Image (tube, rainbow, N blue to C red):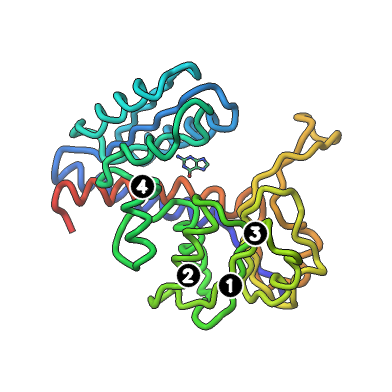
Amino acid sequence: MTQIIDGKFVASQIRIGLKEEAESLLKLTNKKPGLAAILVGDNSASKIYVNSKNKACNEVGFHSVVKIMESSATENELLEVIQKFNSDDEIDGILVQLPLPKHIDEDKIIEAISPKKDVDGFHPISFGKLVIGKETFYPCTPYGIMELLKYYKIDSKGKHVVVVGRSNIVGKPIANMLVQKKEGANAIVTICHTASPDISYYTKQADILIAAVGKANMITNDMVKDGVVIIDVGINRIDDASSPKGYKVVGDVDFENVKEKSSFITPVPGGVGPMTIAMLLTNTLKSFKQKMNIK
Ligand code: GUN
């Protein structure tokens, strides 16, 4: 029997817990956790993400600021906005929505965010701590995957996890999180990428397969073994004449066919996606508590 991993439900449970905690912290401190989201330009997917983050903040009772900048904004203008939020006591988390326009150096921007407010976990200091197994802000999507595995009691200890994709946002951090000598990790990890001559050679060996490539339906039935756990991070739009929008959203995994072989599988949408915002809010609350010296 295949179990569908319901990320929407798990994320809603996390958000209920965060709302309750924010309410009791408000009584205790008279302050709210605050998140600043910065959007440069008018990428339509990025706009949707930033709006959802803002809405989610309001729903759990956090303070939320959205700063929208023209696509022609300069690197220096963006750096100034970051500096302002770095020193703003009402802001505990700063998020610069990626990708940025080509004329802005993404690395320079990420490094300008105070590591104390790096709720995306992209700063080299946060990432370095993650790699050596120190406490830090974990990037939200991989953090969400770890929480899903925990919620569904999927033990990765001694299991072969195959990650397809080596992005800084998902592939590299999730591989490093799962390899740690820690409860809920302790896996044997392989990362496949564009230079892997035959990806299916690796994916067929996976006890847990994490697909984070951004290619619609690329993982097919013949590429996995029976009983595999599938975590699908892909969010891809494909043409669909039967939908009023003219498209539908699918993952990197050919869900209907792979489902039969898997023990657990995340759907798209409703799997990993909703967890990302829940973990962003979790990181923002953690930052607030660190600032207030609350355990
Ligand atoms: N673009 C795609 N995913 C993310 C994310 O998790 N954080 C930010 N800031 N930008 C993204």
Disc 2 to disc 1, how far (Cα)?
A: 8 Å
Are the residues tagged 1 and 3 within 8 Å (C-beta)?
no
* Residue found farthest to the bottom: 158
Residue tagged 2:
178
Are the residues tagged 4 and 3 within 8 Å (C-beta)?
no
Disc 4 to disc 2, how far (Cα)?
A: 19 Å
Disc 2 to disc 3, how far (Cα)?
A: 18 Å
Q: Amino acid at mark 1?
A: Val
Name the residue rendered at 75%, 29% in the picture. Answer: 245
Of circles 4 and 2, which is in front?
A: 4
Whichever of labels 2 and 3 marks the residue nearer the N terminus, that label is: 2
Of circles 1 and 3, which is in front?
A: 3
Residue tagged 4:
123
Vertically, is 135 above or below 77? Answer: below
Residue tagged 3:
193
Q: Relative to the observer, which residue lies in front, 83 or 94?
A: 83
The secondary element bearing badge 1 is classed as strand
Where's residue 214, x and y in %? 66, 48
Residue tagged 1:
161
Disc 4 to disc 1, how far (Cα)?
A: 25 Å
Q: Amino acid at mark 4?
A: His
